[in-house]
Amino acid sequence: MTEDVGRSLDVRLVGDDQWDVVAWLWQDFRHDLGTVVHGFPYADGRYQHAWLDEYPAPDRCGYLCWQPHPNTGEDAPVAFALVRGLDASARAMQAFFVVPAARRTGLGRRLALDLLARHPGAWEIPFQHDNAAAGRFWRAVATEAWASGWVETEEAVPGKPDVPPDHWIRTT
């Protein structure tokens, strides 16, 4: 893949009329997680979307990252993130997704660092135990953002004693 480092990052708050765009990308996000969380789509063909249904809200926001589509040149969404806890003692990265064609270009790292900087203060970033790629990604981002000012813990998944614990990166 080509490096995305020199390209400017076009990150925008999700507009009221753009939540449908996030909903489409959400299905890709949950599809990717399907192998990690053993998730199946429901009877209507869609994956679980309860978290997404909580947006927008006063203490939550979403972001879309845009790049020119390689075939049309028009803006195309290449990533999204959902942040909660805007009015809490710590923000949480509730969801983070980069489309497969834009991965391994540096875009995800740049997007994550941009969002952490937009919301200064304490952060929590959870990821699933079996999602090795997410673990490597978030540990590298945490080290770049906070040097040694973070810890990683494992916590049981509420109501799911049969699955491995989630990992949580938290600023210290």
Image: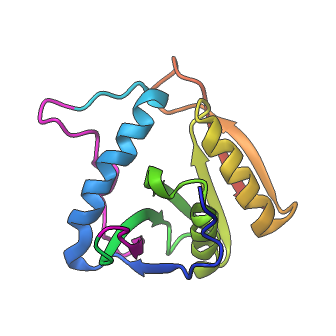
Residue at the right extreme of this rendering? 148
Q: Residue at x 47, y 65 (%)?
A: 84
Question: Residue 90: which quarter of the image?
Answer: bottom right
* Residue 81 placement (x, y as % from top left): 45, 63
Q: Residue at x 19, y 76 (%)?
A: 17
* Residue 118 placement (x, y as % from top left): 58, 81
Q: Residue at x 60, y 54 (%)?
A: 104
Residue 161 or residue 144, whichever sits in front: 144
Residue 74 vs residue 70: left or right? left
Residue 104 vs residue 87: left or right? right
* Residue 74 placement (x, y as % from top left): 30, 78
Bounds of the magenta span? 42-71
Task: Work out whether residue 5 can be spotted.
Answer: yes
Question: Residue 21: which quarter of the image?
Answer: bottom left
* Residue 39 placement (x, y as % from top left): 36, 28
Q: Residue at x 41, y 64 (%)?
A: 78
